[in-house]
Image: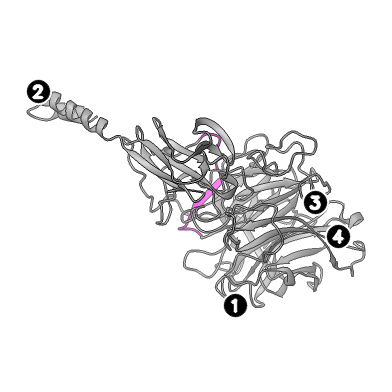
Amino acid sequence: MMIQKFIDRPGYSPRFLSAYCIFWLFCRISAAATVEVSVRDFVFAPKTVSVQVGDTVHWNWIEESHTTTSGVSGTPDGRWDSGVQSIPFNFDQTFNQAGSFPYFCALHWQMGMTGTVIVRDANAPPPQQLDNPIKSRIRKGNVNIKLTPVAEGLTAPNWGVAAPGDAGRLFVADQNGVIWVIDLVNGQKAVFADLSGILVPLGSQGPNTFDERGLLGLAFHPGYQTNGLLYTFTSESTGDPADFSTLPSGTSPNHQSVVREWRVAAPGNPLALVDTSSSRVILRIDKPQFNHNGGALNFGADGMLYISTGDGGNADDQGVGHSSQGNGQDRGNVLGKILRIDPNGRSAPNRQYSVPADNPFASGSPGGQAGCADGICDEVFAYGLRNPFRFSFDSANGALFAGDAGQNDIEEVDVIRPGANLGWPVREGTFCFNANGDEAGFVSRPGNCPSTDMTAPVAQYDHDDGTAVVGGFVYRGGNIWSLRGRYVFGDYAKPSAQEGRLLFLSGRNIAVGQRARKSGLAEMRIQGQQGLGLFLLGFGQDAQGELYVLGNRTGLPFGTTGGVWKIGAP
């Protein structure tokens, strides 16, 4: 291209072109560089280096015995391997193709001794930040609803489900640790369980401040009417050893994400409560930061328990407790994932659950190996997620829908298949995500980022239209014909506003078959209201498939402005 520009210039001469070509070739040859990485103190310093095609990385052993081995979480990929070496030693690797190349020390990767070489094509233009990635705006759709108050005086309700065999009540998880049981006929509410005592103190910056921790998930065992079992996802103070951790030795987590089993002694009795002495810890996960917790729990039609986890927190999926390629892309840890386990089994290392043998990354041993000893966690069902705060199964066909909250630009709705890679932090939605070092990450055009084996969302929108997606349910109720077969979800709050949005996918049954269809999205019209008037925190679904809006007036896990509203026909 550059040569053609010179040929097209007035006054072009072959001698000038020859001189230009020699100069261009000299610059290309002399541009190759060597970047040094120190191998010391059980770290690679710097942990991430950026080079160009043709450059060499030079590892210099300063102390101890280590390796530099290409691959992820103890699993070599065969690109290079220094072998175990002691000082003094140097190792060089020249990179002749663009890409991102993670590596580790085979002796100490479990201590966080990992690194990444990012190789860029010098001829490729640098990624350009998109100020307005999606120019179209979300418009009001053809669905008209009304909201009817069901219960008030809650704090920050975020999930509502029916218990098997209990069609007249809704059980609601409140972020402050209370499980409410609400009579759907008269709206009376009662405390089904108060778990606030096991939570980490809420308020990330002190009392009455924002927080993403708390009671985040609730699921009833399919055999609840017989066994009385239910499960919760809670944010708890550290103390007991974690089953999974991404933190270097000696580093304390912000808190632990804990999945617990509880029992109701007489589930058929409408006055029965949770026996708070019956708790059994299924698994514990160290969380590096307070945010991006995921926290949703659901049983699939297969009887297995599905668990969503965020990428660990912070921003851009980087920092302490984050893999060099991002926790979302690292199948060697359980953050940024949908997990699938059998809570009835006992073959996991902690003897509290089993891994289904048909999990997409299971070792193949009976009941699954469980754990991440081979560099890939057998519990992983899908990966590449940032903060899948809410997910659910379509009661008609079993499709798994998730709302994955984005970083600075894109919110997405995903239909998740076994083994799927949803892209984070390589992608945000369908766009290429650029971590941008210590500066704020941003998205650029899709053409400049890897696309192999990454599942695109079925819908997405940018931050002109919202701030954080809140996943919901496919509507299978009988009261609103225009919603039948459509996925209902929303957004936490409009930009610079104190209220969320109720949204839906315009396509019906978009997840039938092996491939999900892309869909448009629209906002519901609420009878008698210009907007929602609430921070949207979650959704509920009763035994008849009718849906409920959960939210509060402050967006905080404090106070009594929270409530439950039923979505109905106007």
Q: Disc 3 and disc 4: Cα gap in Å?
A: 28 Å
Q: Earlier in the sequence, mark 3 or mark 4?
A: 4
Residue designated by label 1: 207
Q: Disc 3 and disc 2: Cα gap in Å?
A: 78 Å
Could you say which disc has been placed on residue 352 in the image? 3
Magenta range: 452-466
* Front residue (pair 152, 81): 81
Place of residue 247 in the rendered image (x, y in percent of width and height, measured from the top left): 59, 55
Secondary structure of the magenta portion, mostly?
loop
Place of residue 37 in the rendered image (x, y in percent of width and height, measured from the top left): 41, 44
Q: Disc 4 and disc 2: Cα gap in Å?
A: 88 Å
Q: Amino acid at mark 1?
A: Pro
Give the secondary structure at mark 3: loop
Residue designated by label 4: 166
Give the secondary structure at mark 1: loop
Instruction: Kindly check if marks 3 and 2 are in contact, taking CB atoms under 8 A apart as contact.
Output: no
Mark 4 or 1, which is nearer the eye?
1
Q: Amino acid at mark 3?
A: Gln
In this rendering, is residue 217 above or below 343? below
- Taking the view exactly as shown, the residue that stands out farthest to the top is 14
Q: Amino acid at mark 4?
A: Asp
Q: Amino acid at mark 2?
A: Arg
**Is residue 118 rendered to the left or right of residue 401?**
left
Q: Earlier in the sequence, mark 4 or mark 1?
A: 4
Instruction: Kindly check if marks 4 and 2 are in contact, taking CB atoms under 8 A apart as contact.
Output: no
Number of residues whose C-alpha sits closer than 10 Å to that of mark 1, classed few (under 14), some (14–19) or many (20 or more)? few
Q: Earlier in the sequence, mark 1 or mark 3?
A: 1
Mark 3 or 4, which is nearer the eye?
3
In this rendering, is residue 553 above or below 494? below
| Residue at x 54% of width, y 52% of height | 322
Number of residues whose C-alpha sits closer than 10 Å to that of mark 2, classed few (under 14), some (14–19) or many (20 or more)? few
Give the secondary structure at mark 4: strand
